[in-house]
Amino acid sequence: MKTVNKEFDVVVLGAGPGGLAAALAAGRGGAKVLLVEKNGYLGGNMAIGLPLLGFLDKDGNKVIGGIADEFMKDMASYETAYGRAASEHKVCPMHNSVTLYDHELFKIVALHKVLDAGIEVLFHTDIESVNVENAEIREITLRGKGYRIFVKAKIYIDASGDGDMAYLAGASYEKGQKDTGILQPPTMMFTLSGVDIDRTIDYLAENPDQMDRSKTIDCAGGYDADFFRSDPNFVMVAMRKLFSQLREQGKMPVNRENIIVINSLLPGEVHMNCTRHLGTDGSDVFSVTRAEIEGYLQIEKFVETLHQYVPGFEKCYISQIYPSLGIRESRRFSGIRQLTESDVVNGVFNEETIGIGSYCVDIHAGDGLSTIFTKIPAYGIPYGITVSDEIEGLMFAGRCASMDAVAMSSARVMPICMAIGEAAGVGAALAIKQGISPREVDVTQVRKTLLDAGAILSVNK
Ligand SMILES: Cc1cc2nc3c(=O)[nH]c(=O)nc-3n(C[C@H](O)[C@H](O)[C@H](O)COP(=O)(O)OP(=O)(O)OC[C@H]3O[C@@H](n4cnc5c(N)ncnc54)[C@H](O)[C@@H]3O)c2cc1C
């Protein structure tokens, strides 16, 4: 095995929304940054066909700016054969807002930004071990394609979703819902082409009961066929009745009530958020492998069902199955502050706010068909959720940051993960400039840097 030694100011593990924003903010703040990613592209779940949720709160106020918004403005400036590569932030009676973008082009736009910020990227590389002495990270060991890479940095930001670096460092974490420990289930995202979505909308107009939802889903009025007709930028959560009948007949291969159809910017294409893999732990390789095998098999059967029973899908075909299983929830680490259920449902803001969450509490049952989906007020995300309270030099970005399960079910959406990551990157760069720990950083300076870069840190309620 070949070995290499490297030194950086900041190492970011994982190039999803949290890691991308953290690396960009740290790099733009003057730090020498290494961004490590196990896949061969940037974006994490930004590249699996999902819409961006969370830019607007339930009252239509814009609550996310900064790097997340910069990405969408840049994407919207791309004129493609099908039109602009990102939509407006469209108000939605169910999800508060929906922003669609071209996730393939996103990989290229992200690469430009990362290269412009002078960030070194290492693809196809995983973490092997973390050397911790006296509660401080001294070095990490990475591994990829016959190389063992020893990296020393001043600050290590874990943005791997599952918190693989923090786990190897021995940091404390929580998993699953309070009392039960049940984890939200993952989904294998796929894209269908050859879909006549107007026909599907006509079917919903003729059968409005197919828009009925369970009582656990909180949705404002006007989420119906006319809404889908009004503007192609939508996410369609529908057909509970049809799929319940098909399940009774043994023709519905997926354990969930509704299907989620994300209209694509590309004509005739939709992204399907449909499979569900109960009892999966996304941070366990054996469990993930079982779920991925199940995912492929569910998709095969599900497409057959769509062909036969769903108007508009008669001629659809699979154009992509995404290479990474979408993990909603796994480890959440302990920080100097924790974002809690009480903070998010009561809309708490304080002087440490470095970003705003407002997306619904959205908990997919890990042991059944249902989803809890509750609208909440906008709330402030404190800087301390990005800083380990146990291990010096360790920070978090994205869904593995310090949150309880309910708070995470809201803050897990990608624009919010970007806001968390951006704050972590700013905090890391400031700590390095001042030769202090990220724990000692003055949050007023973090907030000022974020505001100067276009972040939104307050909202008129
Ligand atoms: C099925 C599903 C549907 C969702 N729907 C929406 C939606 O509609 N809108 C929305 O905004 N959000 C949605 N979310 C939530 C959102 O996608 C995630 O919560 C968010 O992407 C988390 O961001 P992250 O940066 O923490 O992690 P991720 O996006 O998971 O990124 C983590 C990155 O780290 C890399 N990585 C992991 N482990 C390692 C390792 N050991 N070494 C190196 N690299 C590693 C991964 O390859 C990945 O690139 C959904 C999530 C799922 C799973």
Image (tube, rainbow, N blue to C red):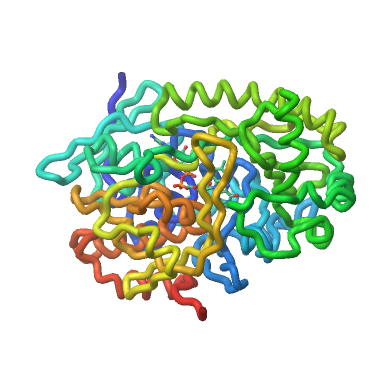
Identity of the residue drawn at 67% across and 54% down: 100
**As drawn, is 116 to the left or to the right of 59?**
left
Residue 323, given in percent of the width and then of the height, sits at: 57, 31
- Residue drawn at x 26%, y 49% is 394
Q: Residue at x 33, y 53 (%)?
A: 402
For residue 433, side relative to residue 412 (left or right):
left
In front of the other: 144 or 334: 334
190 to the left or right of 163: right
Residue 95, position as x, y percentages in the image: 63, 58
461 or 250, which is in the foreground? 250
In the image, 42: left or right of 310?
left
- Asked if 165 appears above or below 372 in the picture, the reply is above
Q: Can you give x and y, in whole percent of width and height, for residue 395 in the image?
A: 29, 51
Q: Quadrant of the N terminus?
A: top left
Q: Residue furthest bottom?
A: 460
The percent coordinates of residue 327 (x first, y second) are: 49, 38
Q: For the point 50% across and 34% down, which residue is it?
A: 367
Q: Nearer the viewer, residue 12 or 209?
A: 209
Task: Name the outermost residue toward the left.
Answer: 134
